[in-house]
Image: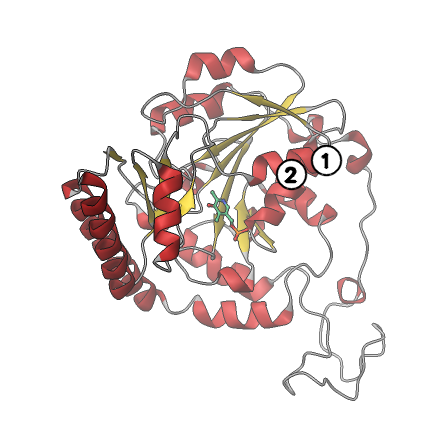
Amino acid sequence: MFSIQTFIRPHLLSLKPYSSARDEFEGEASVYLDANENNLGSLAGGVDYNRYPDPYQKTIKEKLSKLKGVRPEQIFIGNGSDEAIDLLVRLVCEPGKDEVLLLPPTYGMYEVSANIHHIGIQRVPLDEHFQPVFEKIAEKQTERTKILFLCSPNNPTGNSLAPNTVEKLIRSFNGLVVVDEAYIDFTDTPSWSTRLDEFPNLVVLQTLSKAWGMAGLRLGMAFASPEIIGFLNKIKPPYNINAVTQELVSEALDKTAQLGDMLDVIIQERTRLMEAFATLPLMEKVYPSDANFVLVQVPNANDLYGYLLKRGVVVRNRSTQPGCANCVRITVGTPPENDHLLEALQTYAAQNSA
Ligand SMILES: *Cc1c(COP(=O)(O)O)cnc(C)c1O
C-alpha cells in the first residue's frame, strides 16, 4: 500500500511552515494591527489591496469543489500549474539523487523543474501513436524514480493517453503519478480527478490558462489526497495567489455558460481547421486532437514557420521533440484568425507545389 510519508523528503516531514498573521487569527475583528500592512489604504484600485490575500484561497476552492466534484481539502491552488509541478518535484525528489520519469514528446516544464532542482531525468518515448508503452515504463523505474509525469491530452501531440494504460501505470508505479490535464476541457474523456479516492499516489493537474482564458492571471490546480495537498500547502509560498487573481477568478468561475459557449466555438474551429488541413497536399500528417491545438507534419517545418512569420502568424515549431520531426503545433484561434492562417497556408502550398 502506497504511503506518501515514505516519499516526502525526510527534512520536509518535520518542517515547520511559515505561519502568517492571517493563519494565526481566524475570525472577524475591527482593527487589524497584526501584519504591518498600510491601514490607510492602497494606491492600487482603492479596493482592499492593502491587505494580504487569503493564503488558502477558500472562496475559490469552494467553487472549484462544486465544479470539479472534489472536496476542498483535495485541492491545491498554485500560481499556474507550473508552480504545482515545481512544488511536487521539491516535495518528493532529493537533489542529486532522485529522478523523474518523462514520456517525450511532452510538456517542457517537467524537465525544466527537474533541472532546476538537480533531479535526474529518465525518458521512455511515447510510441508511434503517441501512447505510453507500459512494459518499457515499468522497466525504467528504479527506487530513485519518485514521479511519473503523464500529460493527457498531451502537449504537443494533442491526443489523450489510453485510459487503461494510465490506470495500469497508476496502479503499478511506486511513486507519485502526476496526470497533467491542462487541456481536459476540450475533450469528453473524464478527468482522473474522479478517481482520487482509489489512488493515493495520484495527482491531477488542471489550469485556468487554457479553456477558461485566464493565462495572464496565473492559477493552476492540483487535485490529490488531503495528505498530499497538506504537504504542498506546507511548502508553498504563503501568499502564492494574489488578491486580484482571487477576485477575478472567483467571479469567472460562475460563468460556466459562457465557458461552454467558448468551448463550442473552439472545438468547432478545431474541426474546421483539421478538415481544411487535410485538403492541403502540404500536410503530410494531421494528428487527432483532444486539445485547443493541432499538430501537423509538413515537408519542411522551418521553412513553413518562417513563411507564416512573414505573414504575421506565429506557430510553434516542435521539430526538435522526439517523434516530431518537421512538426508544427498550431493553436486554434478566433474564426478570422483561422481564416487568415488558412489563406496563408493555401498560398504557401501553391508556391511550393509549383
Ligand atoms: C499550458 C500548460 C500548462 C501550464 O499551465 P499554467 O497553469 O499556465 O502554468 C501545464 N501543463 C501543460 C501540459 C500545458 O500545456
Q: Is residue 110 left or right of residue 191?
A: right
Q: Residue furthest left?
A: 279
Q: Which mark is residue 283?
A: none
User: On the image, numbered disc 1 is attached to which residue?
Assistant: 117
Residue at x 34% of width, y 44% of height: 304
Q: The N terminus is located in which quarter?
A: top right
| Quadrant assignment for the C terminus | top left
The local crowd at label 2, few if under 14, some if 14 to 19, many if 20 or more residues have their Cα within 10 Å, is some
- Residue 344 in which image quadrant: bottom left
| Residue type, numbered disc 2 | Ser
Mark 1 belongs to which amino acid?
A: His
- Residue at image x 71%, y 32%? 8
Is residue 313 or residue 331 the one in the foreground? 313
Q: Residue 282 sits in which quadrant? A: top left
Residue 314 in sight in this render? yes
Please state which of residues 98 and 63 is positioned toward the viewer in this rendering: 98
Marking on residue 113: 2
- Residue situated furthest front in the rendering: 354
Classify 293 as above or below 143.
below
Q: Position of residue 155 (x, y in %)?
A: 42, 40
- Does 95 appear above or below 312? above
Please, is residue 98 above or below residue 274 in the view?
A: above
